[in-house]
Amino acid sequence: MTATADETRGTPHGTAPAPLSVLDLVTVGAGRTATDALRTSVDIARLAESRGYHRYWVAEHHSMPGVASSSPAVILAHLAAHTTRIRLGSGGVMLPNHAPLVIAEQFGTLEAMASGRVDLGLGRAPGTDGATAAALRRTDRLNEGADDFPQQLAELIRFLDDDFPDGHPYSRIHAVPGPIQATSPGGVQSPHRPPVWLLGSSGFSARLAGSLGLPFAFAHHFSAQNTVPALDLYRESFRPSAVLDEPYALIGVSALATDDENEARRQVRAAALNMVRLRTGRPGLVPSPEEAEAYPFSPMEQEFIDSWNANVIHGTADEVRSGLDDLHKRTGADELMITSHAHAGDLRLRSYELIADAYGLPND
């Protein structure tokens, strides 16, 4: 039992140049709670489903007050209960942080909850700082986890497919829910298995995804300079598989559309201040635009802000549409996965609505 291309490929709607999807970090703004952020996630997922966005992924991050997505599987279960059609997945689960069997069990459970619409996106970075990664993995040998990624991936896929060979130490261990239930007396099993995606911000996962014939997701939103080289490497390395007969790559894009162009600039500057603090070891809640306007940026911090925001597509709906169109032309991405960052959840929700309107997406 393997995932199929039909469970991977999306269909563009309206005038969008490619299928549009959503990446959610469940961001928490100053003065707001994680409960508020999770309610916003439900609202965005419902909107995305009604407007024809193809999939909704949740990222894994740890020890960051402004990011409440430390447990993607838990959040996805919550979103599954509030949606019926949109694909749900991890963007991604950081494989070295978890035992492959645990991930197979979690996503087998999600598949049982939302059959035929669950994606399993995997990354090899920790999604946090080194000390937190050591606490997650209960080891300080962090490079070992990244170096073992191909082996961990192979093990996870075997748990998902329940096909360890005879004599393997794990041949009598089964991820449940999973295929073993179909072979048990009286068993009936779902025909679906969550498609595995590889995520990356450099060439390693691009080459690995290509060689295995898996779909690939590139983090353009924080590694823009590597996007085209990584996508080229993925396509050059691609070998047809039981999953895909040709490459399929999406890119994560940071984009914020607002009714007022000036408000977009204020919001992305506040989000960039959050990144300044994160990169300098001072993670916190997403600051308000007022806090960002009063913040005394040093020349080095201002340089970072300018560089960071150069890769954030923001402004009116028409400006964002134009920016997304240009990015698609430059990269040839098969899908655009949009992440919108703003201090207030209602502005994030409004951004996805404005982008949908700009492309004439359906409104069910």
Image (cartoon, helix red, strand yellow):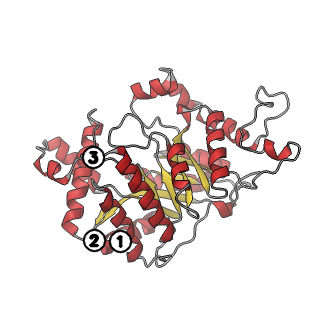
For mark 2, give the secondary structure. loop
Q: Which amino acid does label 3 sit on?
A: Val
| Residue 335: image location, x then y, percent | 51, 63
Above or below — where is 146 with respect to 200? above
Mark 3: few/some/many CA within 10 Å (<14, 14-19, 20+)? many
Query: Badge 2: few (under 14), some or many (20 or more) residues near its Cα, within 10 Å?
Result: many
- Provide residue 70's location: percent of width, then percent of height: 45, 39
**Label 3: element kind:** loop
Q: Name the residue under label 3.
A: 286
Instruction: Pick whichever, 283 or 86, lies toward us.
Output: 86
Rendered location of residue 333, percent (x, y) = 50, 63
Does 237 sit left or right of 305 as displayed? right
Query: Is residue 90 in sight in this rendering?
Result: no
Q: Quadrant of residue 257?
A: bottom left
**Depicted 119 relative to depicted 49: above or below:** above
What secondary structure is marked by label 1? helix
Q: Contact (CB < 8 A) between labels 2 and 1?
A: yes
In three-dimensional space, the C-alpha distance between marks 2 and 1, rounded to whole angstroms, equals: 8 Å
Work out how far the residue at label 1 is from the one at label 3, CA to CA, in angstroms: 22 Å
Residue plotted at (41% across, 72% down):
356
- Identify the mark nearer the N-term, 2 or 1: 2
Q: Residue visible at 35% across and 37% down?
A: 64
User: Which residue matches tag 1?
Assistant: 354
- Number of the front mark, 3 or 2: 3
Kind of residue sitting beneath label 2: Thr
Q: Residue at x 38, y 47 (%)?
A: 35
- Give the residue number, with chain letter if any, for mark 2: 316
Q: Percent x, y for residue 173?
A: 76, 31
- Disc nearer the start of the sequence (3/2): 3
Q: Pointer 1 and pointer 3: residues touching (CB < 8 Å)?
A: no
Earlier-in-chain disc, 1 versus 3? 3
Q: Around disc 1, counting alpha carbons within 10 Å, would you say few (fewer than 14), some (14 to 19), or many (20 or more)?
A: many
